[in-house]
Every structure is written in C-alpha cells, then in structure tokens.
Amino acid sequence: MSKTVDFIFDFASPNAYMTHKALAGITQRTGATVNYIPCLLGGIFKSTGNQAPFVTFANVKGKQEYNKLENERFIAKYNLTAYKMNPHFPMSTVALMRGLIVAEGTGQKDAYIEAVLKAMWEDGENMADNDVAIHVLSAAGLDGPAIIKKTQDPTVKGKLIENTEAAVARGAFGIPTFFVDGEMFFGKERLAQLEEEIAKA
C-alpha cells in the first residue's frame, strides 16, 4: 500500500518550488503520493513566532552566504536550470493559496500548482497582482477570472485559515514541512530522511 505525504505548502517559498521539483523522483521511486495542503506561510510565522531566514539570520556573519551556497548545491543536484529568484519577492500569496483551494475543488489542483510555480519561480511574474494571476492561469488552460473571483468566497477563505491553524497544531513552523506516518520533516534538506521514512515497511 502506497504512503501519502502531507506537504504543508505555500507558493511564497522558493524552497517549496525546489522541493516540489525534487519530490518527483521520490514519488517515482517509492510509489508515494503527495497531498499538497494549502497554507499561509505568513500565518504560520505569526502563530509560531518564526520569521523568514533572510530576516532571522540577517546579522549572522556568514549565514546568508552559506544559505546561498546550499541553494546552489540543491539546484545543481536536481538540475533546476529553469529556477530564478523572483524579482518581486517577497510577495503576498493569499489570493494564490485561496485559488489553490478553489482549483482543488474543481479537480484542477495539479495544473494550478504547475502553472503558478512556473510563473513565480521560473518566469518571474508578479503573481500578487490579480490581473497577472488571471492571465497566467488562463494561459495554462484554467478559468483564471472564475478562480480569482471565487477566492473571495468566505468558505474558501475559512478553509485556508483552517488549514494553516491545523498545520501549526501538528507542529509546523515553516515551509516546506512534510508529514508521513505521524513523523514531521522540515526543509528541503530533509528529503533523504523523508524518503527513508516512506520506504519503511
């Protein structure tokens, strides 16, 4: 029986993009499925007192340089040649995460994830702009106007809040966070450990 990995996910994190790309190999090797759970990284930070690494370690000598090196190694290992840092980073992804909930409800979750990740972390689009988001989604064959309109639905808004609160209750304090068989793994550097956990009988 294949295992399911819960992926606490927000487009806002470049590490979420990198992890998404790397997970393909893990799922192929293990037969596991990945359940992308839309959450709001800012909400997780607020609830846990956490901050983005570029803020937390801003004054730590050598830390930012090492983070850059680690990212370069990860990019090289997984051949993420299309990746580039978004010039609009950091940006609000509230509407995008609500949109993911909408897309999930219409069976278009995978297509939505691929379209938004590409736009944000390959094409450098300002996806915090609803007009840009509508254009990107429509170009990907999705109903961009309808998705963005439905992000204002109170039920959709409530679901994103609920997901975020549930992630914090499980122990999440950042993204990417994964849960499998009750075990939590944080960060793209833990993918080997995640795969080991999946492979356990």
Image (tube, helix red, strand yellow):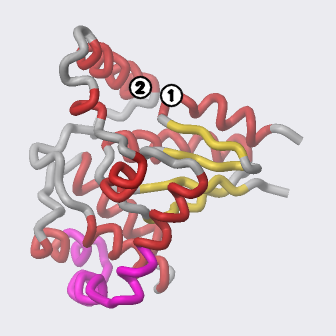
- Residue 34 lies, with reference to residue 132, above or below; the image says above
- Residue 52 lies, with reference to residue 146, above or below; the image says above
Q: Are marks 2 and 1 in contact (CB under 8 Å)?
A: yes
Disc on res. 5: none
* Element on which disc 1 rests: helix
In front: 57, or 132? 57
> Label 1 is placed on what type of residue?
Glu
Give the residue at x 39% y 72%.
Answer: 100
Residue 75, x across and y down, in percent: 37, 28
- Upstream in the sequence, badge 2 or badge 1? 2
Determine crowd level at label 1: few under 14, some 14-19, many 20+ residues with C-alpha closer than 10 A.
some
Give the residue at x 29% y 38%.
Answer: 52
CA distance for labels 2 and 1: 8 Å
Q: Is residue 153 magenta?
A: yes
- Residue 120 lies, with reference to residue 190, above or below; the image says below
- Residue furthest out toward the right: 201
Q: Magenta-highlighted stretch: main secondary structure?
A: helix
> Label 2 is placed on what type of residue?
Phe
The residue that disc 2 covers is 74
Number of marks in the rendered image:
2
Q: Is residue 63 magenta?
A: no
The residue range painted magenta reads 136-160
Q: Quadrant of residue 130?
A: bottom left
